[in-house]
Amino acid sequence: QVQLVESGGGLVQAGGSLRLSCVASGRTFYGYHMGWFRQAPGKEREFVAAHNWRTSSPVYADSVKGRFTLSRDNPKNAVYLQMNSLRPEDTAVYYCAAGALADIGEVNGYDYWGQGTQVTVSS
């Protein structure tokens, strides 16, 4: 059974930092992009960042560039998201995902999803 388990969410003041972790199990994700999406109340799920398997480089949404840093540990089947300079608009449930399709920034490009971890940024 494939599982992606997120951790590290919580409540933080604006300007603060959090580090999200995602550990996958049940299969190898060799050849898969791994990354993060988020969904705020009343909004659609949106791309945050992902590790592009083909280029071995991270890709970021414009809204988080310069503030968030994604890293991946292939032997551990894990991906991490260091979030700095957090803003109230970053408040959302953050989901870890893995996918093999080319659409790295699209929800439809991912086959496996975690249950999500809540991030709340107070002003």
Image: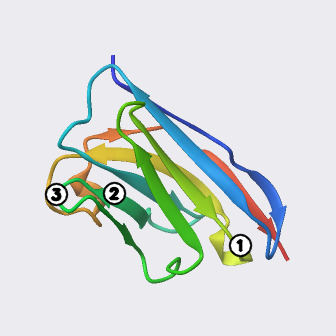
Q: Is label 1 in a helix, a strand or a loop?
A: loop
Distance between mark 2 and mark 1 Cα atoms: 21 Å
Q: Which residue is mark 3?
A: 54
Q: Residues within 10 Å of mark 2 (few under 14, many from 20)?
A: many
Quarter of the image for the C terminus: give it: bottom right
Q: Position of residue 111 (x, y in %)?
A: 25, 41
Q: Which residue is mark 1?
A: 86
Quarter of the image for the N terminus: give it: top left
Q: Is 78 or 108 nearer to us in this picture?
A: 78
Distance between mark 1 and mark 3 Cα atoms: 29 Å
Front disc: 1 or 3: 3
Distance between mark 3 and mark 2 Cα atoms: 9 Å
Q: Quadrant of residue 113?
A: top left
The residue at 61%/49% (across/down) is: 20
Q: Is residue 87 visible?
A: yes
Horizontal arrangement in the rendering, residue 63 relative to residue 105 (left or right): right
Q: Is label 2 in a helix, a strand or a loop?
A: strand
| Amino acid marked by disc 1 | Leu
Residue sticking out furthest to the top:
1
Q: Is residue 83 above or below residue 64?
A: above
Q: Which residue is mark 2?
A: 51
Q: Position of residue 88 (x, y in %)?
A: 73, 75
Horizontal arrangement in the rendering, residue 101 relative to residue 99 (left or right): left
